[in-house]
Image (cartoon, rainbow, N blue to C red):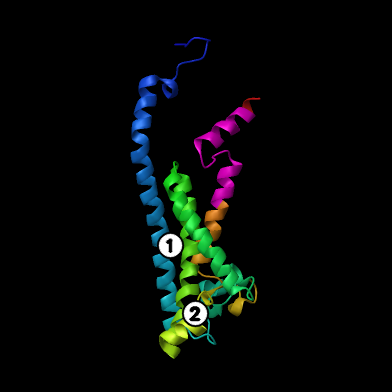
Amino acid sequence: MQRAGGATLSEDTHPDTAVADQERAPERRRGLMVAYFLIAAFVIGLDQLTKALAVNHLDPSEPVRLLGGLVHLSLTRNPGAAFSLATDYTWVLAIIATGVVGFLILLGRKIVYPAWAIALGLVLGGAAGNLIDRVLRAPSVPSAWFEGGLGGFFTESNIGMGHVVDFISVFRPHGQAFPIFNLADSALVCGVILIVLLELTGHGFSPASRRADRSEEER
């Protein structure tokens, strides 16, 4: 069946189908937004749980050897970014992480594809997991608060200067073969890799970007 001008009238362009899709769009977006935040919450919860277990049960001087030495649990405190980068700019990293988390939270309302909910959920969870460490772990707010009371909190607070708990070291202990990391770092990297793959394979974030990619391919 054809429309005027010779174009095929497929299911995607049928008026009744288009109206139905438009009516289901808000519900679909809400579902994807919920899934997005649930993925991020799961990453944050698992990250903080494993960090708490590492802090309570690992001795920094005695790494735990797993999988025949493929992985070592080697506790350390990292003032830098993922994989111990930029260790001298902790407060700058905290500001950047806060901006990224805020942007990703707002972006959640615009997700229309499940793959992007997964990818961005991993990125949000990873960024938020490490941001929690920068805000709540020493030498950030708790140390200033408990050591100097409210006066110390307002005058000597190291807010945003908390050190991130890292404990996964691959191949050799103490990050001798590769920088030590945590589950938040892993989720963040996996999310970014998935985003790159989606973009490279023409599965853009928005329907408009996908239509543009298809138009380029047809030329």
- State the image coordinates of residue 33 (x, y, percent, origin top left): 39, 48
Nearer to us: label 1 or label 2 = 2
Q: Amino acid at mark 1?
A: Val
Where 44 falls versus 113 (above or below)? below
Q: Residue furthest bottom?
A: 147
In the rendered structure, find residue 140 and report the number of the disc placed on it: 2
Q: Is residue 14 left or right of residue 65?
A: left
> Magenta stretch mostly in which secondary structure?
helix
Q: Residue at x 53, y 59 (%)?
A: 100
Where 212 falls versus 190 (above or below)? above
Q: Secondary structure at mark 1?
A: helix
Q: Residues within 10 Å of mark 2 (few under 14, many from 20)?
A: many
Where 213 falls versus 44 (above or below)? above
Q: Residue at x 51, y 70 (%)?
A: 182
Label located before the other in sequence (1 or 2): 1
> Is the N terminus in the top left, top right, bottom left or bottom right quadrant?
top left
Query: Was residue 207 drawn as part of the magenta stretch in this picture?
Result: yes
Q: Is residue 123 left or right of residue 46?
A: right
Q: Is residue 151 left or right of residue 178?
A: left
Evaluate whether residue 131 shows in this view: yes
Query: Was residue 162 drawn as part of the magenta stretch in this picture?
Result: no
- State the image coordinates of residue 158 (x, y, percent, origin top left): 52, 80
- State the image coordinates of residue 215 (x, y, percent, origin top left): 60, 28
Q: Residues within 10 Å of mark 1 (few under 14, many from 20)?
A: many
Disc 1 from disc 2: Cα separation: 22 Å
**Residue named by callout 1:** 43
Tell me which segment is drawn in magenta.
194-216
Evaluate whether residue 180 shows in this view: no
